[in-house]
Image: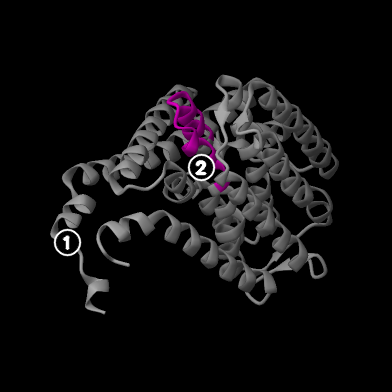
Amino acid sequence: MARLWYIRPESFYFIWSRRNYVNIILLVLGFILLLKGADWFVDGASSIASRFGIPQLIIGLTIVAMGTSLPEAFVSITAALKSNAAITIGNVVGSNILNVGIILGITALIRPLHIQNSTMKYEMPFMILVTFVLILLGINTTISRLDGIIMWLFFLGYLYYIFKMSKNQMEETEIKQTNPLFIPLGLVCLMIGSNFAVDAATNIAISFGVSQRFIGLTIVALGTSLPELVTSVTAAKKGNADIAIGNIIGSNIFNILFVVGSSALITPVPFEPHFIIDSFVAILIGLVLYLCTKKTRVLDKKSWYTLVDHIFNLLYLSSLTNHEFLPIRQQYHLV
């Protein structure tokens, strides 16, 4: 029994070396730059569009709506350019699992979320559909440039649908007037932050002996999902359930169609077989959300979704962690 708690002294250096401290600091700094960069870019771009007379509706549907997914976009594209495709796909799939499985669950604990008929009939099924499309396109182990074009066609169709729906509802987004210089400043922060995050995450994966897929699905995905968490929790506190749910569903669709599609247009993205399983996990969580809210159209702490979702996430995370850290435990005689 004592052997289970025995760790060789050198393993502490392996885990807590000075280099790992530097990588963790760079990773956190990268996330901070990504968050602020996305915020400044959205504010600056929205302000310029408003000054040129572009309707607030269009600004809300494009610049503001995509703002929360900018960290995923820059991290994934940067990872693809650096041939770290495991982080590209892992970041997107991991963020989508976190968005529906964790962030939406946390938001529902704060205040009950009432789901609109259009969300149940069209947007949730479309989110599940595009995840399945990702699996079909990646089943040959590569997301090619042609696949990227297909994803972009889906994305343009989705934007057209959102535009028509929002135009019928006649809702507009309040635009914050800011200095246009925030656009280049935001872009610089996004580029530097994404480079820091990708490089640090890659080094941490190498140091800990785990795959880039695991780092992308967990640490990187959690960091790039912070805008969705802040937006959804804030919306829930203000009683804006439509914004909270729409932000999550829309972000997941944007992550697959725009982020992966754009990455593939720049350079073909390898799709590891493990990502098929991870993508199916994202589909299953989406199905659980759909089935548990289909009748009541309400998501709260008493709904079956909250319980099933937490159990499902614990089982998935436990399985993922056990698989990744088994070689390390064997190396240091922990099993």
In percent of width and height, residue 219 lies at 42, 49
Q: Residues within 10 Å of mark 1 (few under 14, many from 20)?
A: few
Viewer-nearest of labels 1 and 2?
A: 1
What x and y, as percent, mark residue 110?
A: 57, 68
The secondary structure type at the circle numbered 2 is helix
Can residue 15 be seen? yes
Q: Looking at the rendered structure, which numbered label has been put on residue 8?
A: 1
Disc 1, disc 2: CB below 8 Å? no
Q: Quadrant of residue 79?
A: top left
Compare residues 331 and 96 and report the one nearer the observer: 331
Rendered residue at 73%/59% (across/down): 287
Residue 70, labelled with which disc? none
Q: CA distance from mark 1 to mark 2?
A: 33 Å
Magenta range is 73-93
Where the C terminus falls, by quadrant? bottom left
Percent from the top left, x then y, of residue 124?
Answer: 75, 52
- Residue 237 shows in this picture: no
Above or below: residue 49 compared with residue 316: above
Q: Amino acid at mark 1?
A: Arg
Q: Position of residue 114 (x, y in %)?
A: 74, 63
Which secondary structure, mark 1?
Answer: loop
Image position of 219 (left or right of 167): left
Q: N-terminal of the two: label 1 or label 2?
A: 1
Type of amino acid at the residue the image marks with label 2? Asn
The question of residue 79 being in magenta is answered with yes
Which residue is under mark 2?
91
Q: Residue at x 45, y 27 (%)?
A: 83
